[in-house]
Image (cartoon, rainbow, N blue to C red):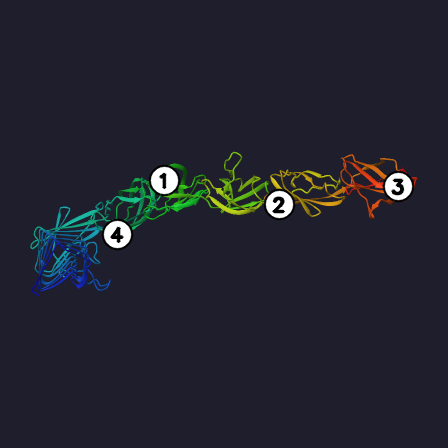
Amino acid sequence: MNSQLNLINSTLKDNYAFYGGVNYNIGSNITIQGSNFISNSAKNGGCNYNNKANLTILNSTFTQNKGRGMTETDLNTNGSTIYNMGGNVSITTSNFTDNLANMGGVIYNNGSIKITYSNFTNNIQYQSTNQCNITIYTTCNFILHDTNITINYGSLGNKTQLYIYSPIINEQLNLEENVTFMIDGSYNEVTKDQTTNQVYMYTYFGIYQNQITSHVEYLKPMENTNITLNFDRKASIYDMMDNITIKSCTNTTIVAQLKDKYSNIIQGNVDATIKINNKVYATTTIKDGLLNTVIPTANLSANTYTLKIITNENTLYNSATIVTKITVVKRNISDIILPNVTIKTFTNHTLVAQIKDEQGELLHKTTKICAKINGVTYLHSNITDGLLHISLKTDTLRPSTYNITIILGENNFYNTKILNYKLTLIKRNVNMIATTNNATTYGNLLINTVVSDIDDHVVNDGFVLFKINGCTLKDDNGNDIHVYLDNNHAFLNYSIPFSMSGITYKLEVVYNGGYKFNNLRINTTFTLTKRLISPVEIEPIVQLTQTNTNIKLTLHDIDNKPIKGINKICVKINGVTHINTNIKNGIINLTLPTNTFKQREYDVLIRIGENSVYKQCDIQFKLNIINRNATIKTKQNTPIITNNTLKLNTQVTTPYKIVNDGFITYKIDGETITENKTPIKVNITNGYANFTYKLSEKYKTGIHNITTTYHNSYYNTITDVIQIKI
């Protein structure tokens, strides 16, 4: 009470109350200046309820405010902007547009109100006829001057009769006071209706008349006030529409509120045809002024087109063509982060990705692409419906990291886009096994190496080298031996040098995979088996006594290869070692010391001892020592005389040598000559035995037989008989 409220340069929107949607003023002072009231509502006084108070409004606007009941069917509302109950209201230089209530479309006054230099446009009542819309309802103390009130009633259809009502109800207007309606230069003076307090007149449309404009003039207190009421039999649809810009591959949805030339919303149904560059794209029906339709523009290329909305004539509206421009702009392709990819050599790279535009939609239609690797074009292809699915031939590329560039070409619907990512090729892993034969010393070592890709690709790349006990195998020229892969295999036939003994060796197999496969080395062992010396069969040897036995042999191994190197050799005769020596290159040239051997059969063993290359080998044979043959001849040196001495000379001869060993025994008439009962033995010297013997008396004169016997362990026993005469 008795307070002051100033609203300056304010905007008050979407407020609601039972009394005064924005303010309810009882007994106070409110000043509103330079402010906007939009879409506020109340049952009484959609913006302001002024109860025995003072309200001053300067330079302000009131738009689309309304009186609203507590329910949708409660239409008993007053003053969409101001409800003045016993107060004082002053309005200057303000605008009231499209406000709605039941009684007093804009202002309901039951107090004192003065309006100057203001404009009221198309403010109406609920459930009014086309001829009756009340802008101001006043019961007392009303002053209006230098103000414009305009109502555009729009189309009346086929009506010919017309009642024109003043938009002001002033209960204080005298019954005798005239109000002038001026139509087409004709002035008609009427007075208010005593029952309804309304002022109206009757007229009609001529046969060819489509529009009636009436100006209403009051006397005091409404000087310099222009009241204009427009009526159309058939209205013209306002042909202004903003230009439209859409993205390519998009159907256009047009939502527009169509109005007539007086800015009234079109009523009823109006059929329309939509053309783009004079080609029909859609037909639709505009309902109560709302154009809401979808135009199939998704196939339009980026360009600017002429869009026409052609409305058909009906009972309310003339045919109209609304022309605007529709501009289709190319879509941008969204920024897609393609992940970096790592693949193995021998592999083609497949890229699958969904390509979307800036609005998150998959690309429509077909888009050409170019794929580059390190700036070199590898592929031209197309994307269909946003699916990028390409395969780049990368199976011949070396391991490295490559820059992949995918260029999505500009077309009629999309701007160009460049996508980049990294492609890394890495060497493949392999498995490897190596097997060897059962090699013998200085033979051939066969190494079969199998290199397999863990993904079962055939391996034809790289080479294998070999190390035995850490030493790399080399060829005859001293170069490392490289065995190249062929269908996963590397086969080496290596001639084992004589220097390698029959032992177990470490074999290291080293695979060099080149630029496609990772290197790999494995370790295994192999054992060289010592060679067997081929056994030699020697026929039994027969040897004369007093002679050494010569043995000459050339030994071979079981592969008939000559024996190499130095071998120890031992010769045993009847288990007794007679020779320990070495032989070279398998040549045996031995002299067995058998010159002292007696006649008999001997077992001879020649043992070639085991060494680093050869296994032990035994050669066995029989040696038969046989006695020699000799001849003897005995001579009587002197005539034999009784009781005299016997002298004999025996010569022993052989074809081999002069005999100096053995002895002779003699018999006379079969009786061995003895001494002290022991046979007399006469040694051989230089092949002769000289024997002198004193004959005993028992030997009488006459002829006697002298038996000479040669005894020698190396010779066969020989007997010679001669006769002597005593």
Mark carried by residue 407: 1
The 10 Å Cα crowd at callout 1, few under 14, some 14 to 19, many 20 or more, is: some
Q: Of discs 4 and 2, which sits in the foreground?
A: 2
**Cα distance between the residues tagged 1 and 2:** 78 Å
Q: Is residue 666 visible?
A: yes
Q: Amino acid at mark 2?
A: Glu
Which element type, helix, strand or loop, lies under badge 3? loop
Q: Tag 4, which secondary structure?
A: loop
In the image shown, does 455 or 706 lie closer to the viewer?
A: 706
From the image, tell me which residue sits under label 2. Answer: 610
Residue 374: percent from left, percent from top: 38, 38
**Residue 156 image position (x, y, % from top left):** 23, 51
Residue positioned most to the right = 702
Identity, as a three-letter code, of the amino acid under mark 4: Gln
Q: Which mark is residue 643?
A: 3
Q: CA distance from mark 3 to mark 4?
A: 199 Å
